[in-house]
Image: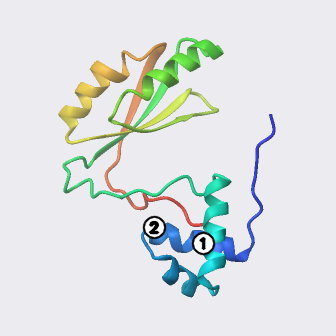
Amino acid sequence: MAERTVDLDVFDTKILDVLAVDGRISVTALAQKVGLSKSPVQARLKRLEENGVIRGYRALFDPILLRRDHVAFVEVKLTDTRESALDAFNAAVLKVGEIEQCHMIAGSFDYLLKVRTSTMAAYRAVLAERISTLPYVANTSTYVAMQAVKEEGFAA
């Protein structure tokens, strides 16, 4: 199955760059920043949303203020990598709220998880009770982040 892509021109890219920094910007202000009038910017936004380039808008929270600033990256090696095992693992991961990101990896392990909790003790409980009991988990290795240098999204 071929990957679907969308051709972006310089104005689309400018729109995405501005939205990556300020997703709540008004259409009028966005139009001024990219050098177009309001109507073409609205049409471009609609097209970018309909084509799936813009998948949504969300609020970014301060994890320190919410007491969720303990971040661990977890390498997961599975006992089975047939499609049915991968599907079972993927479905189970979606149910663990502390797992912020999950990526299938081509390498010496199968998945890399980003796990966010309040403390090391909370992480240990999540690892023991939730992650280690996911389907087909053979073993895990944990790397605790000391500082987040860059976390939010990307610019087009």
Q: Nearer the viewer, mark 2 or mark 1?
A: 1
141 displayed left or right of 107? left
Residue placed at 61% from the left, 66% from the top? 45
The quarter holding residue 35 reads: bottom right
Amino acid at dot 2: Gly
Instruction: Tell me residue 23's x, y (percent).
Output: 45, 67
Residue placed at 36% from the left, 15% from the top? 133
Q: Is residue 146 above or below residue 22?
A: above
Q: Secondary structure at mark 1?
A: helix
Q: Which residue is mark 1?
A: 42
72 displayed left or right of 3? left
Q: Is residue 11 above or below residue 139?
A: below
Q: Residue furthest front?
A: 39
The crowding category of the residue bearing disc 2, from other C-alpha atoms within 10 Å (few below 14, some 14 to 19, many at least 20), is some
Q: Is residue 38 above or below residue 78?
A: below
Instruction: Tell me residue 53's x, y (percent).
Output: 63, 56
* 3 or 63: nearer the viewer: 3
Residue placed at 26% from the left, 53% from the top? 63
Amino acid at dot 1: Gln
* 130 or 142: nearer the viewer: 130
Instruction: Tell me residue 3's x, y (percent).
Output: 76, 43
Give the mark nearest the N terminus, 2 or 1: 2
Q: Which residue is mark 2?
A: 23
Residue placed at 74% from the left, 66% from the top? 8
22 displayed left or right of 40? left
